[in-house]
Image (spheres, helix red, strand yellow):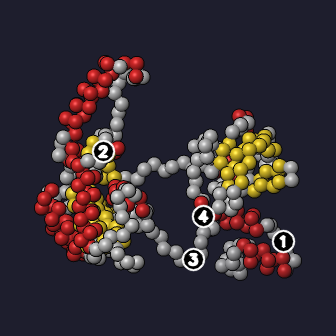
């Protein structure tokens, strides 16, 4: 019936209604869909673009000068609506800022000039990674990299975390206590960025490179500093052994620089999965009725801590629930003190029904 000439182009709902009007009942709408699915005849009828799967960029640097990543960010000018563009290029192995320029606007020509200056000082890298901004994908930048035989790498479309080193550095810059709310002029912005880059490269101890400075790693001084630190720790351990709980020195930081996506974060840190949360959508507690979704989109402030009988037919027993509801503007999944999952705390959970 569904494949007949009359109904071949009609959805099951239309077929169902038409047959009912004729006094005919064959099956339910869900049965029609199931039959169609068994014969691989259920799909979107619209002509939709099929985008190919894009592999995430994965770049590994085993030494300085191999992989550079760059991006630009806005710096607020003296008045509202006035912004300056800061171009920053980073060596992902050492986290060393090889170049930082500030201009009044963003163009591919300015990016090309910055790269020429950086490559002339620090050498030509093997790979340059960037996102898909206008200056990053401009013909002038592409032509320069092609002429120098440098591999171009770009973030996937609409993926913001494929350029993590640049984004993390911009946060370090703008969250610094010395970062001003606005810059008085273009020269002020350039002078501030020069001072900040010098501090970051030569004084800031980076947690991602073993608490070394970027300059020490970039210029090969980190190994000697590591030996000196180990000697200092050994001397302190010998003088005060009761203050150390382990026999080996602590391991700090990774051994190489890489650019890829971090593993996906779990929504919950306990054994309770989002699927399990769907079964906990309703609770009855005396005169109260609580209904919540997986990600707790509450719109009022309230805190409950009690044992509630569960209304789900699939799970029996009681559960000790601590729910913190925050305004809609504060919908940030954060751990509550003493909790086991983001947004709320689940304490005693029947082990047989976990």
Tell me which residue sits at (31%, 23%) in the image.
Answer: 236
**Disc 1 to disc 2, how far (Cα)?**
75 Å
Q: Is residue 115 left or right of residue 183?
A: left
Residue 306 x %, y %: 77, 43
Viewer-proximal residue, 206 or 255? 206
| Earlier-in-chain disc, 3 versus 2 | 3
Secondary-structure class at tag 4: helix
Q: Which mark is residue 329?
A: 4
Quadrant location of the C terminus in the rendered image: top right
Q: For the residues labelled 4 and 2, say whether their Cβ atoms are less than 8 Å apart.
A: no
Instruction: Find residue 89 and report its image quarter.
Output: bottom left
**For the residues carrying marks 1 and 2, which lies nearer the camera in this image?**
2
Residue assigned mark 2: 205
Residue assigned mark 1: 25
Q: For the residues labelled 3 and 2, say whether their Cβ atoms are less than 8 Å apart.
A: no
Residue 62 x %, y %: 24, 45
**Disc 1 to disc 3, how far (Cα)?**
29 Å
Q: Is residue 134 above or below residue 219?
A: below
Instruction: Find residue 81 and report its image quarter.
Output: bottom left
Viewer-proximal residue, 322 or 5? 322
Residue assigned mark 3: 46
> Does residue 335 appear in this view?
yes
| Earlier-in-chain disc, 1 versus 3 | 1
Quadrant location of the N terminus in the rendered image: bottom right
**Disc 4 to disc 2, how far (Cα)?**
35 Å
**For the residues carrying marks 4 and 1, which lies nearer the camera in this image?**
4
Q: Is residue 36 left or right of residue 61?
A: right
């Amino acid at each position: 019936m569904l494949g007949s000439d009359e109904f071949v182009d009609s959805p099951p709902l239309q077929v169902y209604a038409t047959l009912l009007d004729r006094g005919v009942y064959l099956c339910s709408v869900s049965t029609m869909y199931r039959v169609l699915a068994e014969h691989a005849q259920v799909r979107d009828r619209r002509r939709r673009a099929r985008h190919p799967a894009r592999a995430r960029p994965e770049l590994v640097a085993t030494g300085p000068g191999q992989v550079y990543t760059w991006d630009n960010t806005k710096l607020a000018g003296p008045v509202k609506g006035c912004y300056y563009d800061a171009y920053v290029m980073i060596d992902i192995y050492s986290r060393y800022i090889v170049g930082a320029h500030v201009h009044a606007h963003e163009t591919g020509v300015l990016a090309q000039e910055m790269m020429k200056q950086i490559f002339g000082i620090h050498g030509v890298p093997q790979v340059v990674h960037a996102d898909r901004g206008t200056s990053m994908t401009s013909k002038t930048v592409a032509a320069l990299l092609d002429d120098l035989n440098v591999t171009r790498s770009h973030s996937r479309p609409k993926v913001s975390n494929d350029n993590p080193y640049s984004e993390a550095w911009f946060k370090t810059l703008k969250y610094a206590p010395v970062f001003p709310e606005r810059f008085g002029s273009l020269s002020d912005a350039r002078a501030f960025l020069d001072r900040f880059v010098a501090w970051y490269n030569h004084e800031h101890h980076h947690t991602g490179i073993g608490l070394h400075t970027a300059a020490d790693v970039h210029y090969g001084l980190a190994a000697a500093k590591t030996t000196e630190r180990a000697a200092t720790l050994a001397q302190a351990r010998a003088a005060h052994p009761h203050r150390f709980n382990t026999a080996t020195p602590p391991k700090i930081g990774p051994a190489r620089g890489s650019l890829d996506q971090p593993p996906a974060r779990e929504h919950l840190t306990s054994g309770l999965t989002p699927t399990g949360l769907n079964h906990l959508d309703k609770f009855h507690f005396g005169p109260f009725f609580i209904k919540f979704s997986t990600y707790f989109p509450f719109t009022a402030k309230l805190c409950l801590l009690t044992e509630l009988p569960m209304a789900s037919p699939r799970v029996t027993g009681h559960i000790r629930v601590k729910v913190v509801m925050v305004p809609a503007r504060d919908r940030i999944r954060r751990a509550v003190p003493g909790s086991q999952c983001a947004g709320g705390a689940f304490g005693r959970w029947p082990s047989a029904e976990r």
